[in-house]
Amino acid sequence: MATPKKKISRSRRNMRRFSAAYKLEESFTLTSCPECGDQIRAHRICGKCLTKGVVARKA
């Protein structure tokens, strides 16, 4: 099994982890809510409609 030749510092490790997570945020697909027209992420419940009680629960 492959092993690293040198230890990766905490700083380099954290920079790698941050940059990977940061790139994921940019790739979100935004759609408009069918009820209020607000921009939301795909396949998510709209926060504005949820607080107003517009979104009905499935029984």
Image (cartoon, rainbow, N blue to C red):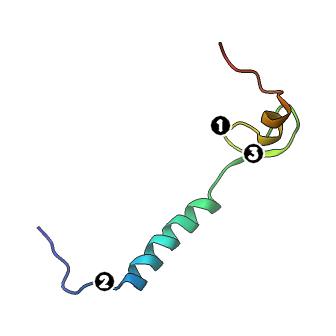
SS type, badge 1: loop
Give the image quarter of residue 31: top right
Q: Where is residue 13 in the image (x, y as percent from the top left)?
A: 39, 78
Residue tagged 2:
8
Which quadrant does the C terminus fall into? top right
Dot 3 or dot 2, earlier in sequence: 2
For the residues marked 1 and 2, what is the alpha-carbon distance in whole angstroms? Answer: 38 Å
Residue 40's disc number:
3
For the residues marked 3 and 2, what is the alpha-carbon distance in whole angstroms? Answer: 38 Å
Looking at the image, residue 40 sits to the left or right of residue 19; the answer is right
For the residues marked 1 and 3, what is the alpha-carbon distance in whole angstroms? Answer: 9 Å
Say which amino acid is labelled 2.
Answer: Ile
Which quadrant does the N terminus fall into? bottom left
Residue tagged 1:
43
Dot 1 or dot 2, earlier in sequence: 2
SS type, badge 3: strand
Residue displayed at 82% across by 32% down: 34
Say which amino acid is labelled 3.
Answer: Ile
Say which amino acid is labelled 1.
Answer: His
Q: Where is residue 23 in the image (x, y as percent from the top left)?
A: 57, 66
Residue extending farthest left: 1
Q: Which residue is more in the foreground, 12 or 34? A: 12
Residue displayed at 18% across by 85% down: 5
**Which mark's residue is nearer the viewer, 1 or 2?**
2
Give the image quarter of residue 17: bottom left
SS type, badge 2: loop
Looking at the image, residue 57 sits to the left or right of residue 15; the answer is right
On screen, residue 34 above or below 27: above
Looking at the image, residue 36 sits to the left or right of residue 59; the answer is right
Residue extending farthest right: 36
On screen, residue 12 above or below 46: below
